Amino acid sequence: MSVNNPHIFDTGIYFITFTASKWIPLFSEIGCYDLVYKWFDVLKSKGHSILGYVIMPNHVHVLIGFLKNEQSINTIIGSGKRFMAYGIVSRLKEQAQTSILKILEDGVSAYDRKKGQLHKVFEGKQDILLCHSYKFVTQKLNYIHSNPSSKKWALVANVSDYMHSSAGYYLLQRQGKYEVEHVNKWIAENWK
């Protein structure tokens, strides 16, 4: 689903992916995984649940149990990306990462520049998929968790060893850096 198609939604589980601009490994490069966790906290404070996640060097996959809301998912995700973008730019400036800042500045379109945007931290679109079945939920959860050990990344041999993932919780009942709610518990309480 494109960021330009607002989706007012009912309660459900959504698979969401967003990517750093030009696939730059911003999360690993400047150590800003905590900004994603802070956004997760904001979602939780509004009654939503983080059911599974992985934060890769340049992108995030997350399963979120959303409760019925008047805002569109696009607005919720866009607000989170904006919050993270400000934090990322701030850290890049603190770390004097001028070459990355220049790439992010050059990525802003003339149209967005006129609206005041200074840096393009994330790609404009994100994937937002409603999970219609338990089979689809588990498929996405497995996909999320296998990312760090895929051929492309090879960050770890064992998926449960990747610290910025919920794989350890689902495989070993050991919460990772961020505490998630089990999919089965959320479904039992919210999926009617």
Image (cartoon, helix red, strand yellow):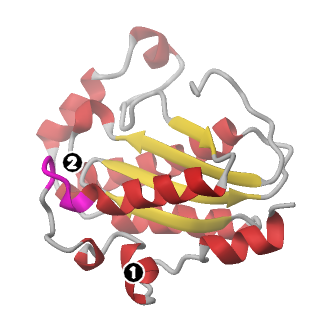
Callout 1: helix, strand or loop?
A: helix
Q: Which of 22 and 109 lies nearest the eye of the viewer?
A: 22
Q: Label 2 crowding class (10 Å Cα cut-off): few <14, some 14-19, many 20+?
A: some
| Kind of residue indicated by mark 2 | Pro
Q: Which residue is mark 2?
A: 25
Mark found first going from the N terminus, 1 or 2: 2
**The N terminus - image quarter:** top right
Q: What residue is rendered at 36% in x and 38% in y?
A: 121
Q: What residue is rendered at 55% in x and 76% in y?
A: 180
> Is 74 on the left or on the right of 88, as rendered?
right
In space, the residues marked 1 and 2 are separated at their CA atoms by 27 Å
Give the number of the disc on residue 171. 1
Callout 2: helix, strand or loop?
A: loop
- One can see residue 177 in this view: no
**Looking at the magenta stretch, what is its main secondary structure?**
loop
**The C terminus - image quarter:** bottom right
In percent of width and height, residue 41 lies at 59, 70
In percent of width and height, residue 114 lies at 49, 14
Give the number of the disc on residue 125. none
Q: What residue is rendered at 14% in x and 63% in y?
A: 155
**Residue 107 colored in magenta in the image:** no
- One can see residue 69 in this view: yes
Say above or below: 16 vs 38.
above
Say above or below: 130 vs 87.
above
Which residue is the extreme one toward the front? 135
- The magenta segment is 148-153
Q: What residue is rendered at 35% in x and 52% in y?
A: 88
> Is 97 on the left or on the right of 191, as rendered?
left
